Image (cartoon, rainbow, N blue to C red):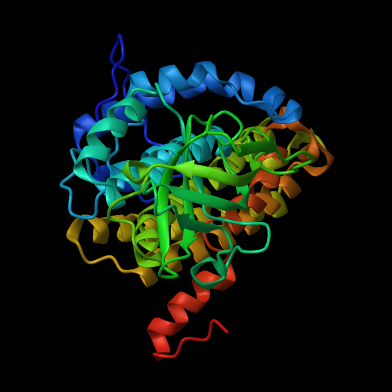
Amino acid sequence: MTLTTEQTTAFEPLVSDFYGYHNLLSAQEKETLAALRAYLETEVKPLVNDLWERAEFPHQVIKRLAELGLYRFAWEETKTFENSAVFRGFVALELARVDASVATHVGVHNGLAMGSISIAGSAEQKAEWLPKMAAGEIVGAFGLTEPDSGSDSAQGLRTVATRDEATGDWILNGSKRWIGNATFSDITIIWAKSAEDGQVKGFIVKTDTPGYTATKIEGKQALRIVQNADITLENVRVPEALRLQNGNSFKDTAKVLRLTRAEVAWASVGNSIGAYDAAVRYTKQRVQFGKPIAAHQLVQDLLVKSLGNITASLAMVVRVSQMLDEGTQRDEHSALAKAYATARMRETVAWCREALGGNGIVLEYDVARHFADAEALYSYEGTREMNTLIVGRSITGFAAFV
């Protein structure tokens, strides 16, 4: 992936990259990250607190993110990428450092929706849909989670796909919940259990199809910029040509989740850094007892503990991404990274909020949003408990899911 800009921006290492993991990146990758950071800092960051408070998505960023190249990733396990997995992780980190909701939008569209087509689609489906999605002409969503089925999606999926023998079409009935991008997506990848063989299959569903309804979820207190929806499917007719031809069991769904789970771990590090950067900046400026509070021992303790969490998590996600490039990453590797990094994120954003005292709960100081958004990152793409069980099965040889 190469981001296109009118001018070259010099790359500046993040102060929070304390052990210098950016040195693993090529000169071109650093230049690309610098261009992305410049755009996010100047055109996105000034908007996000207001958007978060109003629970609105900045639709104007879609065109620019596409122009910058953020939708060009083709998630295939066997593909040799233009850039390293470590670089792609740093992209997720940079996005979440500014706003975890924008990072989630990109992850859903590029990682989950495009990833489903890349991994489970036919050559014809890839050729038809991926270029349009990469250009931002079509926005995708990913429909797996249901009102009564989340962590048990592998077994408890209730959305049913029934084959119409007369036409060969599929009829979808069921519901989905917490579907990001779904209030404005052009297509949604719906995973449903086949009435024929009981296997989970994937479908490219055009959102203007009769019987498809998406309703925005109101009242969220995390990732408020993300437009999550409840989806109802009432006799939604999908032609066989829009069934993902290589998505024939939950194992195929899991391939998509495996590749995107590590990106969530990277995003959690970015969310931690966003809160940490704001806390460092604030504590250097806030004067109490005649000096900046950053000069007080207890405040420094909070900052150092936060940096320790960030550094340990960054080390883990870097290694997991290297393993992806090497072809050695397994489910348990990305699961441990997601479970660990999101847990440490929760601690970190809490310490950063504490460092700001009462101002830590006010949006304008740039910690409260990261503090709240951490709860969603902690839960989605596999809760800590589910990822723990994936790792536990690897350690012991026993599956303890039920």
Quarter holding residue 180: top right
Farthest top residue? 6
Farthest front residue? 166
**Residue 267 in the image, given as x and y percentages of width and height:** 48, 46
Q: Is residue 303 visible?
A: no
Q: Is 29 placed above or below 172 here?
A: above
Q: For the N terminus, give its image quadrant.
A: top left
From the viewer's perspective, tell me whether residue 339 is left or right of residue 134.
right
Q: Is residue 149 visible?
A: yes
Residue nearer the viewer, 108 or 12: 108
From the viewer's perspective, tell me whether residue 92 is left or right of residue 222.
left
Q: Residue at x 58, y 52 (%)?
A: 173
Q: Residue at x 28, y 15 (%)?
A: 8
**Residue 157 in the image, given as x and y percentages of width and height:** 55, 64
Quarter holding residue 277: top right
Residue nearer the viewer, 46 or 333: 333
Q: Is 154 placed above or below 31 here?
A: below
Residue nearer the viewer, 190 or 136: 190
